[in-house]
Image (cartoon, rainbow, N blue to C red):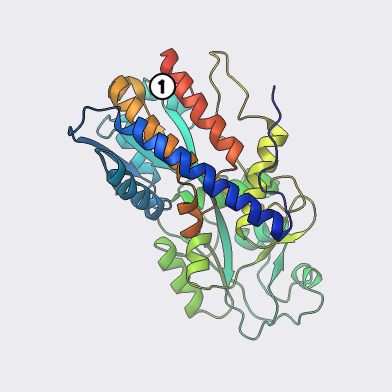
Amino acid sequence: MPRLSLSFRRVGLPALALAALATISACGDRRSSRADSATALTPSGTRVDLTGAGATFPYPLYSRWFNEYATLTNVRINYQSIGSGGGIRQVVARTVDFGATDVPMTDAELASAGMPVLHIPTVIGAVAITYNLPGLARPLNLSPDVIADIFLGTITRWSDTRIAALNPNVTMPDTDILVVHRADGSGTSYIFSDFLTTVSPSWAAGPGRGKDVRWPVGIGGKGNEGVAGQVKQMPGAIGYLEVVYARQNRLPVVHVRNAAGRFISPMPFEIASAATAVLEADRKLFASDSKGTPDLRVSLVNAPGAQSYPIASFTWMLVAPTAIGPQKSRQLAAFIRWALLENPDVASTLGYVPLPSEAATRIVDRLDATLAAGRPGPP
């Protein structure tokens, strides 16, 4: 079994600059050849339309990718951002050519689909925890068990001794903690509850993980905007949202203690480190099921590694080759190869975290091999 090399190790700036120049040069050559190969999939001048639906989190990135891809090929991709649950439902109903989700399908969902559905990781995201504590001069530090107990409602005051112990140089206000959660089902809630389920036996035995969670305490906000709005309006509030939204709106975020005992902020390097650490530790990217196909439904929460941010996740494209046929499957595979290998820098410019380069190569090679072999089993 090959070992996945680290693609996001901290290196000096000169080394980063040289690597960037080498990557840009290599990508330029590859971009040209890949665009030619993608265009060659359809007769010249024949327009191809593909449709997709699903997660809202990757929509800005997908929209940019689809627009740029259309300028290089005759493939036009229409995508509706209706949420992860809608993406899964429409793939299973065979009303779209592909779906998108921040929540992997369960074994039961895959079994009931009546056809193989491939999970293709496309980019890495994370959930940030934001708060409203006027006068707090330093970032708030919290541990996984304390976060779980806040959202369980067993820690109710900011002056709680467990919170104070994690922030020794800060005077915490003696005020109520006001929990804000998502009111709608969402991939963000799934990632956050997946983290709470992993780190807290009490949470695992209670609310558990899911897109729709029965929150023990707090008030709901619709979407990232709703949660952020509630937190901003209420001193003492705490909530969770997508890290890109928090970054774009300059919201304060909690530094979360990771599995190595370090307090980590949700920055791109630290989010990518979680993916690299999990893939190295579990080798799931290279593991195969009984049918010889890899399962890419990998959780990144509470990842090992000193630099890993602990609330990270892949987001996936869902492709059901038997439903859309070999021609559209090959066209989608060509797009995915172009996006992940030839145009990953777009993700960084929009605030997303690209897949580690070696992982991206393995994923598209596995996808091509699976489709060529005509055995599109799980994932």
Label 1: state its secondary structure: loop
Q: In the displayed structure, would residue 90 be above or below residue 243?
A: above
Q: Could you say which is closer to the camera, residue 302 or residue 204? A: 302
Q: In this image, 100 relative to 138: left or right?
A: left
Residue 327 visible from this viewpoint? yes
Query: x%, y% of residue 90?
Result: 30, 36
Query: x%, y% of residue 66?
Result: 32, 46
Q: Could you say which is closer to the camera, residue 6 or residue 278? A: 6
Residue 103 visible from this viewpoint? no
Query: x%, y% of residue 124?
Result: 54, 48
Q: Could you say which is closer to the camera, residue 343 or residue 37? A: 37
Q: In the displayed structure, would residue 134 be above or below residue 54?
A: below
Q: In the displayed structure, would residue 128 be above or below residue 94?
A: below
Query: x%, y% of residue 294?
Result: 55, 24
Quarter-wise, where is residue 128 in the image? Answer: bottom right
Residue wearing tag 1: 116
Q: Could you say which is closer to the camera, residue 158 or residue 216? A: 158
> Dot 1, how many residues are within 10 Å of its Cα: few (below 14), some (14-19), or many (20+)?
many
- Residue occupying the point 72% across, 35% down: 281
Q: Residue type at mark 1?
A: Pro
Q: In the displayed structure, would residue 375 be above or below residue 217?
A: above
Q: In this image, 350 relative to 262: left or right?
A: left
